[in-house]
Amino acid sequence: MKKINKVLGLVLILLMVTGCWGSMAFAATINDDQTITLKIIHTNDTHSRYTYSVKNNTIGYAKLKTIINQESPDLTVDAGDIFHGQSFATIETGGSIAELMAAVGFDAIAPGNHDFNYGSSRLLELGIMSNTKILGNNVTESDSGSPFFNDDYLIKEIAVDDEILKIGVFGLISPDIYGDTAPSNVAGLTFGTRESVIATAQQAVAALEAQGCDMIVALTHIGDSDNGTLMRSDAIAEGAPGIDVMIDGHTHDVENRDVNGTLIVQTGCYSSAVGAVEITLNKAADQPESEDSSYTIKSKTARLTTVAEASDDLILADPTVAALTAAIEAREDPIKKQVVGETPIKLGGSTDNIWQDVRLGELNLGRALADSYRFVTGADIAIENAGGIRAQIPAGEINKGQVIDVLPFGNYLVTKSVSGADIKKMLETSIEIGVNNQIAKDKNDNSWPANSGSYLQWSGITAQYDLSRQVGTRVFSAKVGGIEMNDEQMYKLACNNYLATSNDYPGLKAADIINEYSACDESFINYLQTAGADRFMTAINTPNVTVGTGPEPQPAPQPAQKQSSTNPRTGYQPWSWAMLFRLVFSL
């Protein structure tokens, strides 16, 4: 902490008033015991959830701005996965979210894997539009080794009485990103190894300490994955001592733990909460007045503001950000009317109740969606869950708004490596869910199963099943590429990120992720515009999983009885007349 003389202090105040100082703030709290409390407001993994909704459990940017105004933080940051995930963002390749970010006011953000989904060059543009620093110290150009982002770190200077306190901030993204976005999005970039990322963190801490920072914050899009195969944020805390607070993201967890003197926090995901960290610093005892004051951290606490705590009677939406949100929605409305394809027939079910129809059988819309996922990813097989399909498309021109209505959740595609045996189990499970859904419909008492939306729509597979057979043995044929599926063979399967973690399909959930791709609505639009009419018509007109009558089950072969040379009566050798003659006369 640096001493400021009174004249300079007055000058700094003047600069703040006239807006001429870029990184100076006067928000720190001086407590009665002369300790100093600094406050950080943080978010992570919002995935472009931008508005307040109790139903969707989101706080949104207008209320976030009010929280910031009320809390007066010294630092406002986000730990990544900001610009992608909902049609509100994807229509403008993240630009709409960047506008809201700028209106709210963020000091720095870490890049998330999905922030690269529009390509690395676009991410740089979004950082500028957001009026914030993107901090990803371990992201470098593959050819030159030069840093990809413009800033190595942020140093935020906080004026406290006649002194300046420095907060140093650096950022990291998981080196495991290569499977978390399409390869083309990060072409020409290197994210390092786990060892090199820890070394990068050590270097950043040393550099910030050399700059006289009183507190060091790491923005990390890494998380606390418990599967043992991905890098964890606590490895950074263990390997790079000196980090006071780690604002974490990526795994959609709620974190609040201390590791090696580092407080690691994470708010969950989808704007479900806003995090606040308070750090109290204490001046060293019996320290003489000097140019370089020394402060130690006395305490660190973390808390969350949830959607329930952000109701209108407690937190009103900031009117400026709310007006901007409405203006963006209005300007996107014509974009949603853009024509992206056409269909000669209605895409949907036999009734106007798509919610029911898609849970009871295979639909032409479901086949087209699944086929688009296979087209975009190059997968052998693709699936879409019934719960992810929310609207029909009438015959005629198809516009963006209709696609967004069909796929409103902002899910993105993943590919996984799944065995033939597990895919057959998925077929069996989906069939049984469909049977139970039909029973619920026939009863007409609103008793639909809780997992009714896990019924699957398929592409890339031709299967037949027999309902007269026992549950779990109904599928009697399943072919991929015209060849019967091999239980031992691994197949590349594409699905949305929600379905990829479904407990209804444990084999799918446990399977390794190969890669991640664009949003489902983007993929379907791509398909409509580039796959060609022949493929589209084949998909909507050709059933994939059909009911039939399977061949009679063959009895299991009985093991051959072992021939005994000492006891002929237990073997298969016929008895000769001589043997019978000896037997009779021996009685």
Image: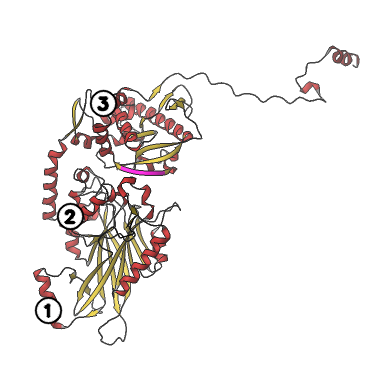
Camera sees residue 311: no
What's the distance in space between the residues labelled 2 and 3, CA to CA?
Answer: 38 Å
Asked which quadrant contains residue 310, the reply is bottom left
What amino acid type is highlighted by mark number 3? Ala
What's the distance in space between the residues labelled 1 and 3, CA to CA?
Answer: 71 Å
Q: Residue at horizontal 11%, vertical 69%?
A: 20
Horizontally, is 30 left or right of 378 in the view? left
Mark 2 near mark 3, Cβ–Cβ under 8 Å? no
What's the distance in space between the residues labelled 1 and 2, CA to CA?
Answer: 33 Å
Q: Tell me the crowding category of disc 1: few under 14, some 14 to 19, or many 20 or more residues within 10 angstroms, Cα based.
A: few
Residue 582's place in the image compared with 405, above or below, is above
Task: Return the residue at label 2.
Answer: 129
Task: Return the residue at label 1.
Answer: 10
The quarter in which the N terminus is drawn is bottom left
Task: Return the residue at label 3.
Answer: 533
Q: Residue 532: x, y in percent?
A: 27, 28
Camera sees residue 370: yes
Q: Residue 211: x, y in percent?
A: 28, 74
**Sequence order check: which comes first, mark 1 or mark 3?**
1
Specify the segment rendered in magenta. Answer: 513-517
Q: Residue 139: x, y in percent?
A: 32, 57
Indicate how the structure is coloured in the image. secondary structure
Q: Tell me the crowding category of disc 2: few under 14, some 14 to 19, or many 20 or more residues within 10 angstroms, Cα based.
A: some
Residue 89, disc: none
Residue 397's place in the image compared with 198, above or below, is above
Q: Residue 407: x, y in percent?
A: 26, 37
What amino acid type is highlighted by mark number 2? Met
Say which element carries label 1.
helix
Q: Mark 1, mark 2: which one is toward the viewer?
A: 2
